[in-house]
Image (cartoon, helix red, strand yellow):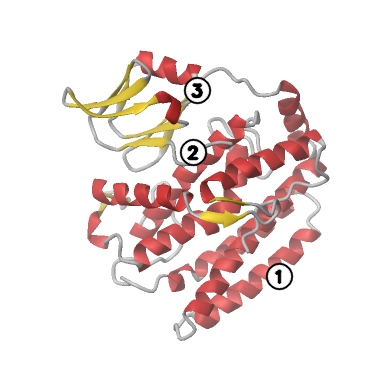
Amino acid sequence: MKKHHNTLFVTTQGAYLAAEGETVVVRVDGKDKAQFPLHMLEGVVCFGQVSCSPFLLGRCAERGIGVSFLTERGRFLARVQGPVTGNVLLRRTQYRLADDPEAAARVARSVVLAKLANSRTVLLRAARDHPTSPGVEDLRAAAAGLARAIDRLEGAPDVDTVRGVEGDAARLYFDVFDHLIVAQKGGFRFHGRTRRPPRDSVNALLSFVYVLLTHDVASALEAVGLDPQVGFLHRDRPGRPGLALDLVEEFRAFMADRLVLSLVNRRQISAENFVQGETGAVWMDDETRKTVLVAYQERKQEEIRHPYLEETTTVGMLWHLQALLLARFLRGDLDDYPPFVWR
């Protein structure tokens, strides 16, 4: 079993990471600020001007610890990892099925079904928890629209059709997303999904948490021997982790969107801590970024009952379990891939 709370996030600008014995040391201005045992780490994520010693990168590669580099605002730049050690037969099967239109559509339908079902659950729970909200009827209408989209998926013959259904459903969902924000409306208005760059504070939060989730899911896929780059729903593109993005779809609403909404609605962050650049891009300051990281790690430690395995686990284990289930499906041990559907 993979530990879920052992990713080291380094956000302090100018920090330098070095290996010292069997530990990684974080230095700032030549002074040691923190030290962590390598055997306790599964991944290292560096934001902005954070550098690592070549010796540390080598140590991490030997131990299967992925080191990711992101911009200060959370845009993925690169990932350093050791030699691929996954089962070559499993990966060959993954590549064959990804090139098989019928097989790819089969997996893509499962992933998108889970995404729409989980998005619908988020909307219905919000409508139930805030029955007097001005937007409650819009939430219910959008939830009904997502239910119809799920029905359309059953007859989707190919991946392009699945993508079309997913795109229509995403627009329905984000059209009412602003109704899910019930506090700090003055500073956290949502007028639609914008990315590269995000144009408001809510989009900045969503993009940042999506990046964190993608990093974790990619690590989970690598751990079971799958190639995070070759997906079924997302087209191949150099540098894009297609399969990781496929599985992320299952967890966007359940993990990322709910976390962002919780931070805003519980007033754990403030709109004053976001900065807009000359180009219109919006990003969060260091303090807010740390608040989000802590909340993300804490959410991963919450317990949940896996709907398919019917076992109690933690949220942070979910993508590891889904990666295992996907691997079992590809090996032929399961008739279908059972996606994560939140209940």
Number of numbered discs on residues? 3
Residue at 71%, 36% in the rendered image: 327
Q: Is residue 200 visible?
A: no
Callout 1: helix, strand or loop? helix
- The residue where tag 3 is placed is 81
Q: Foreground: 64 or 277? A: 64
Q: Secondary structure at mark 3?
A: loop
Does 40 sit left or right of 83 as displayed?
A: left
Within 10 Å of disc 1 (Cα), the crowding (few <14, some 14-19, many 20+) is few
According to the image, label 1 marks what residue?
Answer: 148
In-image side of 256 versus 98 (left or right): left
What x and y, as percent, mark residue 343?
Answer: 63, 64
**Dot 3 amino acid type:** Gln
Left or right: 208 in relation to 128: left
Q: Earlier in the sequence, mark 2 or mark 3?
A: 3
Which mark lies nearer to you, 1 or 3? 3
Q: Nearer the viewer, residue 50 or 172?
A: 50
Q: Is residue 268 visible?
A: yes
- At horizontal 63% and vertical 35% (from top left) the residue drawn is 236
* Badge 2 amino acid: His
Q: Amino acid at mark 1?
A: Arg
Q: Please tell me which residue is depicted at 45% across the width and 74% down the height of the picture.
A: 179
Q: Is residue 268 above or below residue 290?
A: below
> Which residue does the numbered mark 2 point to in the structure image?
215
User: Mark number for residue 46?
Assistant: none
